[in-house]
Image (cartoon, rainbow, N blue to C red):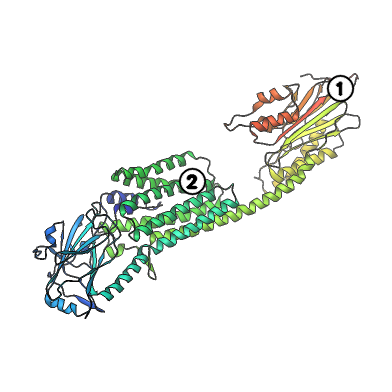
Amino acid sequence: MENLPRASIHPRKLSVLWLAISLLCALSLSSQTTTAPPSAAQSSTTQPSATHAVVVLDGPWRFANGDDPRWADPAFDDSAWATVDIGKALSDQEIDTYSGFAWYRLRLDPQQMAAISGIGANSTPELLVTGYSMGQLDVYVNGVEAGHTKGMTDSPRMYESPPFAVPLSGVNLSAPVALEIRAWAGPDVKIQHGLLAKVELGSTSDINDRLAMAAARQWNDHAIAPMVVSFLFLCVALLGLALYLAQRHHAEYLWLCLLCLTVSIRGVFDVLYGLAQIPLSVYDPLTAFSGRVFMAVTVEFVLRFTEEKSKRPVRIFQVCVLLLPFVYLIQLEQIYAILSVTAEIVFCALVCVLLFRAWRAGRPDAGVMLLPFFLAATADSANSVLDYAGYRHWLPMSLTDHRFHFGPIEFDIGTIAYAVFLISLMAVILYRFVRVSQEEQKSTAEIAAARSVQAMLIPTKLPSNKYFMLESAYFPVNGVGGDFFQVLPVEDGSIKLVVGDVSGKGLQAAMNASTLVGAFRNELSHDPATILNHLNNVMLGADAPARGKDPDALVSFATCLCARIFRDGTMELANAGHLSPYRDGREMEVPPGLPLGVIPGIKYEKVSIRLEAGMRLIFLSDGVVEAANPEGELFGFERTQQVSNEGARYIAQTAKRFGQTDDITVISVYIASCEEKKVERELVEV
């Protein structure tokens, strides 16, 4: 297991399968973190092994944890120290984990140095010192400081430590040479492997070659994979932005852009830290904030993607998770570790619940999104499980290594998980974009067709005369609605009128409405009840094919009101579940009836009403009554009655300004005069 600090044990897990185990890992590792190497006891001198003019100083080295300036003295007696092989882990050499400082010492006698000095005839020998992970090193030669890593200063700081060269200029190679190396890692790091990985001795040219290879290896191990992942997420972020610009009403694409951008920025932090450009004290807060922003943005993306209506749990989680990094800044590390894992568990559960609910509601793309989230979660948690198993010695460290190589480039399970997540995410989003584009094109074509049908349903000129003055207003909510009305003159000077509302929206509703309008215009009878009886049969016939294909399909129906007004002021009226008309600002009492298309063979009731000159009749659809303001308050019957003595356009505009939610249709009939004639029929006064 690598010497990793506690803060990097659980950076951005998405786990579901390993949640409980991840919690155990975080709680156990919150008070501990990294580790360094032990070995079997041997003599304090070494017989170096040479490879291509470079000598590898494996040891045995003398080792002791702690810190004392006297340990840099070449004359210091280190015979009581443990002997270790720096090529092996300390934990495998029966040396306990430790924190803070430790020293390594090695003494080369003159005979050995004489053999070493032959590797470079006229060149200055150099040491190539390689640290393990983030260990900071300070090298002394014969008690004199000769070189150190970037973070090994008077106030040590944790950096990724690349190999560095230490020249041995001025050192008498014919005399004994004492090497002392001081190692350090932060107090919250439990060192298990050891902070010194390798020491090599060779000529300047050979060591420079090795140093160049080590620098390239550092890029391969710590920079290339996160750079590639960061670049890919940046490309997807740009794709999300392009999709959002193409479909502005789909905000999920904008949040996809922000989601991928946060991952890309996090990758930049990983690269800077892996190349030792920023210390751990800077890297940890940056990743803490970027990781929590990633969670908040991701749940917002999933919320928009699934079109979930219940937003309060998501908003509460987002506020809490964005406040979490401030707990880290005030150095409540134990509390932060527990809250971090808790946030990750809630994050995974919330995302999976939202996707699962959308999938169950008939959104297959949401179901596909569950797979990449699950893979990323499982893989990231597997890293923590393997690390924890190695730390507890449940598995040999060789089996806990979850690093892989593609050529010289190193990557881990988390990189694989992000790649799978990214590929799946792109596939789902592109599929969704194509599907939505096709649906919108189809919808646009349907709306265009419905508008052409709508032109037949809404008269542009009403048959006013000296007896009747008519006015109408029609405002569809989405360009095309299911409302319809017709006013036709009759040979005897009367007019017959129908107003209705077909269930549903779009082309199907417009087609059903056009069918009813056609039937009304072709109906020979002028009796309102007879007309409604006929329209009921027409509606049932229009809906029969859909019922035959799917017995469980939603049944289409229509509310409708039919009236005939005579020149003498008599009005005959029949109602099929529509709103009652208003007369001079008061709602008329009209016997209710079932909507058209519900029950075959129904007989509608007709009533006769006496009207006087100067009266105004208002026929309207439920879009007026059901108009609602942003607070959810309905326009309602009371407000409708208050404006019901105004003109049709005034009523419709008032309801629309209040907050239109459905098609609005209003017809106003003003009785200008009545023909003087004795009417021999029963009048039902309201």
Residue 259's spot in the image, x, y percent? 47, 51
**Snapshot quadrant of residue 67:** bottom left
Instruction: Give the position of the C terminus as an image quadrant.
Output: top right
Residue type at mark 1: give it. Ser
Crowding at mark 1 (Cα within 10 Å: few <14, some 14-19, many 20+): some
Q: Relative to 660, does residue 223 appear above or below in the rendering?
A: below
Residue 40's spot in the image, x, y percent? 16, 67
In the image, 298 versus 219, the foreground residue is: 219
Most distant residue in the front direction: 170
Residue 320's spot in the image, x, y percent? 40, 41
Q: Look at 84% across and 38% down and name the residue there.
A: 521
**Residue 237: image tag:** none
Q: Relative to 51, does residue 347 appear above or below in the rendering?
A: above
**Would residue 565 be seen by someone viewing this image from the given angle?**
no
Residue at disc 1, secondary structure:
loop
Residue 598's spot in the image, x, y percent? 71, 37
Residue placed under numbered mark 2 in the picture:
300
Residue placed under numbered mark 1 in the picture:
673
**Would residue 463 be seen by someone viewing this image from the given angle?**
yes
